[in-house]
Amino acid sequence: MAQKTYTQKEVSVIFHKNERTIRRWVAEGIIPRTRIKGELKITKAGLDQVKPPPTGGRDNVEIGKLRVMLQELIQILRSTDLTKEEQEKLRQAENMVDKWK
């Protein structure tokens, strides 16, 4: 059974974004492409995995970057020896960052 595939124009309609944004998301790997019969396609399965980045201007972009940075820092801190109090603070910070997703 053939997979459902979409053009970038169709994806732009699905996400209510312009085609330039969709092309950027594809280039950045936010929207995955699959090689089907030698051509790169956007599949339904790929779209189901997409979590669009925050929108709404510069402030939300900065918040998105901050969220990613905090997630990376949390991973670094998890690899160190922490006291129980520090572990609890880290868990609370992680929960706050997860609410921004």
Image (tube, rainbow, N blue to C red):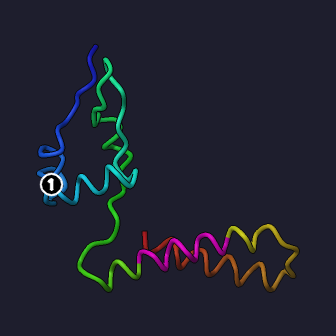
Left or right: residue 35 compared with residue 17: right
Q: Quadrant of residue 78?
A: bottom right
* Residue 35: image location, x then y, percent: 36, 27
| Span shown in magenta | 64-74
* Residue 27: image location, x then y, percent: 34, 51
- Judging by the rendered image, the residue that carries numbered circle 1 is 19
Q: Is residue 31 magenta?
A: no
* Along the viewing direction, whichever of 11 and 23 lies nearer the viewer: 23
Left or right: residue 67 compared with residue 72: left
Secondary structure found at label 1: helix
* Along the viewing direction, whichever of 76 and 92 lies nearer the viewer: 76
* Along the viewing direction, whichever of 38 and 2 lies nearer the viewer: 38
Residue 76 to residue 18: above or below: below
The quadrant of the rendering that contains the C terminus is bottom left
Left or right: residue 80 compared with residue 5: right
Give me the residue at 28% from left, 57% from top: 24
* Residue 80: image location, x then y, percent: 84, 72
Left or right: residue 29 compared with residue 74: left
- How many discs mark residues in the rendered view? 1
Give me the residue at 88% from left, 74% from top: 81
The quadrant of the rendering that contains the N terminus is top left
* Residue 42: image location, x then y, percent: 28, 37
Residue 94 to residue 13: above or below: below
Give me the residue at 45% from left, 76% from top: 65
Amino acid type, mark 1: Glu
